Image: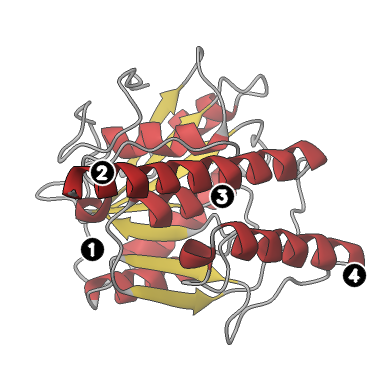
Amino acid sequence: MNAIATASLSIPSGPFIVGDAGNEGAVELSLILPTYKEAQNIGRTLEAACSVLRAVPGLVFEVIVVDDNSPDGTAELALDATARYPEVQVMCRKNESGLATAVIRGWQAARGSILAVMDADLQHPPETLAQLVTFMRGGCDLAVASRHVEGGGVGDWNMFRRMISRGAQVIGLVILPEVLSRISDPMSGFFMVRRESIRGVALNPTGYKILIEVIARGRIGSIGEAGYIFCERTEGASKATGAVYLQYLKHLLRLRLDLLGNLFSGGRRAK
């Protein structure tokens, strides 16, 4: 297993840690799979993701599993899969936890010019990866898999869950309209971003919703959105709890204050 960076949560121009994936030449895409207790899903996720990405013409990629010391052997199973999928690397964290920071630690170790993230529980269909790559190759700074554009949906969600999701989006539009109005699905955890758009940016996410952090703090110009159907997990337990939504609200408020502070300090310097 590879080591974990311990530096600040900022994205460098190149990897803090050089990986040992079996790719030759420049890596175009680095896909991060943050995991915690995904032993029942990680093997199928790696198989599906690698199959889709291998089919994209000319794509040199790596998949980095960042595991939060799962007690169910998730990291060990991912490591076993590297024999079949040499594009896969595994990183295991023991002194840090949380999905958003796991993604950033993976990006810090990544070699690709395009940085991506996808859930490892098959709720994000790996088939959508190919369409996101197309957007990025077309010049987008950010490509988001969305449940709220043509071709997207939330499957068998009940009315209460739909209301909670939409309510969270409305709250976000009220607190950070200039950020959340740019995309249809700001709660998405399935996207790709150009390294150059967040290079040198200090990221400070709370909880699970790193996409909002990327848009708010990054240099994001053109955005593409690909519709996908959010799939209910068939194995393992969901990590969507009330605490997640509370973290989301705290994140919005902190971003609002930070952006206002940046605006104020910028105005003072300009006088």
Q: Is residue 155 left or right of residue 99?
A: right
Distance Cα–Cα, label 4 vs label 3: 23 Å
Q: Quadrant of the N terminus?
A: top left
Q: Give the label, 4 or 2, closer to the camera.
A: 2
Label 2: element kind = helix
Label 3 CA crowd tier, 10 Å (few <14, some 14–19, many 20+): some
* Residue 59: assigned label: 1
- Name the outermost residue toward the front: 271
230 relative to 211, above or below = below
- Does residue 208 show up? no
Q: Give the label, 3 or 2, closer to the camera.
A: 2
Mark before the other along the chain sequence, 3 or 2: 3
The residue that label 4 is drawn on is 159
Mark before the other along the chain sequence, 4 or 3: 3
Q: Amino acid at mark 4?
A: Met
Q: Amino acid at mark 1?
A: Leu
The residue that label 2 is drawn on is 268
Give the image location of residue 91, x and y in percent: 41, 26
Label 1 CA crowd tier, 10 Å (few <14, some 14–19, many 20+): some
